[in-house]
Image: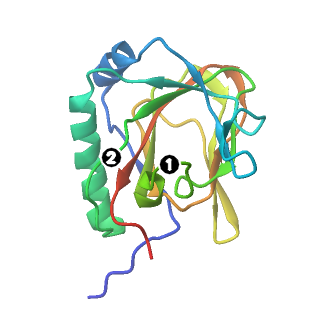
């Protein structure tokens, strides 16, 4: 039997976290908000622009969150991609999208100013932390098709290879909260 990986298909996992765990995660979100920035080759630094209008926040004391995500992503990876993974080298972040905030088309893998870590991103994840918002669908370009994941239940995760182009559409009401991060391995060659 030959294994054929699903290299351009996001995988939706329901109940990555229970509602009680989501409540605990909300209690771990730090108070300091930072603007979502974009790397500018021209300026050789990260800058604020209209492509990304969301806010980044950190999680504190989140080892149980990391361990659960590593477990879930590991199982999905074995079933769908079989990437050679080494672990989580970057901190997870919470992204807060207020009304009209969005995150334009981008890849999670690629260049960075001082580090090679983004080149080592193999699997990205986005986990919905609330449902009191409208719009804000997670959209992908796959094989010239577009796929939008909208109105996902709390605790649902969308996992995907970090090289897939994706964006978060503008939020039209409320505030969208998502836990995002990456699982790493040797760079794709």
The reply to whether residue 11 is in sight is: no
Circle 1: is it few (<14), some (14-19), or many (20+) Cα within 10 Å? Answer: few
Residue 23 lies in what quarter of the image? top left
Q: Note whether 79 is above or below 182 in the view shown.
A: below
Residue 169 in the image: state x and y as whole percent: 70, 39
Near-viewer residue (139 or 109): 109
> In the image, which disc is placed on residue 16?
none
**Dot 2 lies on which element?**
loop
Which residue occupies 26% across, 65% down?
78
The residue furthest right is: 50
> In the image, which disc is placed on residue 89?
2
Circle 2: is it few (<14), some (14-19), or many (20+) Cα within 10 Å? Answer: some
Residue 138 in the image: state x and y as whole percent: 60, 44
Quadrant, the C terminus = bottom left
Report, in whole angstroms, how far the alpha carbon at label 2 lies from the one at label 1. Answer: 15 Å
Question: Earlier along the polypeptide chain: callout 2 or callout 1?
Answer: 2
Write down the residue under mark 1. Answer: 114
The reply to whether residue 167 is in sight is: yes
Quadrant, the N terminus = bottom left
């Amino acid at each position: 039997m030959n294994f054929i990986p699903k290299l351009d298909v996001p995988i939706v996992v329901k109940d990555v976290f229970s509602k009680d765990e989501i409540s605990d995660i909300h209690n771990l979100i730090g108070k300091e908000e930072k603007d979502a920035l974009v790397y500018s080759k021209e300026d050789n630094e990260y800058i604020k622009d209209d492509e990304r209008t969301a806010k980044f926040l950190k999680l504190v004391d989140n080892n149980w969150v990391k361990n659960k995500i590593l477990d879930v992503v590991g199982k999905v990876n074995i079933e769908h991609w079989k990437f050679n993974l080494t672990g989580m080298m970057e901190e997870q972040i919470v992204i807060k999208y207020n009304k009209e905030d969005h995150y334009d088309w981008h890849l999670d893998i690629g260049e960075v100013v001082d580090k090679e870590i983004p080149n080592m991103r193999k699997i990205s994840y986005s986990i919905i932390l609330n449902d009191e918002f409208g719009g804000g669908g997670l959209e992908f370009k796959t094989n010239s098709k577009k796929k939008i994941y909208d109105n996902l239940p709390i605790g649902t995760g969308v996992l995907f290879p970090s090289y897939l182009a994706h964006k978060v559409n503008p939020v039209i009401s409320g505030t969208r909260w998502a836990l995002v991060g990456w699982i790493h391995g040797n760079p794709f060659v």
